[in-house]
Image: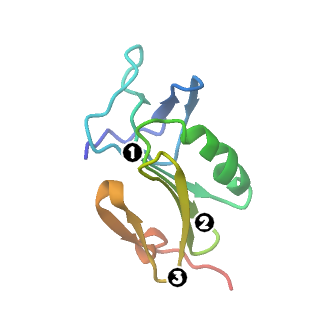
Amino acid sequence: MQRFPERPDMRVHVPANGLYTYPDVSVVCSEGQHLEETYLDTLRNPLVLPEVVSARTGKYDRADQFLIYKRIASLQHYVVVESHRPLVGVYTRDTNSSWLFQEYKGADAVPLPALRLELPLTGIHRKITFSA
């Protein structure tokens, strides 16, 4: 896994429609591919894109943002982390390039086969207290 300098302005290019987005996190397991005309601030090959959603941004992140991201050929998982409840939704590209959706809550672990790991929900929502 390649680590990039922590940059709040790392963006992702979506070649299919020419858009640029700023995901909360970008994960690349091979060498990062960047647009040549940029200064390593535009990633072209993310493998996993997690987004932390709020009540205000949730509808956009779950629907519209996913429609943009799923056009990135390298993307294998789009992870939607709820900020106001212990819930994570994962869109996973299958072998037919279709997308499968699964929700994880409670004590579940979130499998990310493209990274060959599982993330425990307790780790994702660590130090967060949810209201009843």
Instruction: Choose the circle earlier in sequence order: 1 or 2.
Output: 1
Contact? badges 3 and 2 (CB < 8 Å):
no
- Residue 52: x and y in percent read 56, 57
Q: Is residue 44 above or below residue 51?
A: above
Left or right: residue 106 versus residue 61 is left
Q: Residues within 10 Å of mark 2 (few under 14, many from 20)?
A: some
Task: Name which residue type carries label 1.
Answer: Leu
Residue placed furthest toward the bottom? 132
Mark number for residue 83? 2
Q: Which residue is mark 1?
A: 47
Numbered disc in front, either 3 or 1: 1
Q: Are there few (<14), some (14-19), or many (20+) residues within 10 Å of tag 3?
A: few
| Amino acid at circle 3 | Gly
What residue is at 60 percent from the left and 46 percent from the top?
66
Q: Of tags 3 and 2, which is closer to the observer? A: 3
Q: Which residue is mark 3?
A: 106
- Most foreground residue, 111 or 34: 111
Could you give the CA–CA distance between mark 1 and mark 2, rounded to whole angstroms? 22 Å
Q: CA distance from mark 3 to mark 2?
A: 14 Å
Query: For numbered disc 3, what is the local secondary structure?
Result: loop
User: Which quadrant of the figure contains the C terminus?
Assistant: bottom right
**Nearer the observer, 31 or 114:** 114
Disc 1 is placed on an element classified as loop
Q: Position of residue 103 (x, y in %)?
A: 56, 69
- Residue farthest to the top? 37
Residue 119 vs residue 9: left or right?
Answer: left
Q: Could you tell me which residue is drawn at 48 percent across and 33 percent down?
A: 12
User: How many numbered marks appear?
Assistant: 3
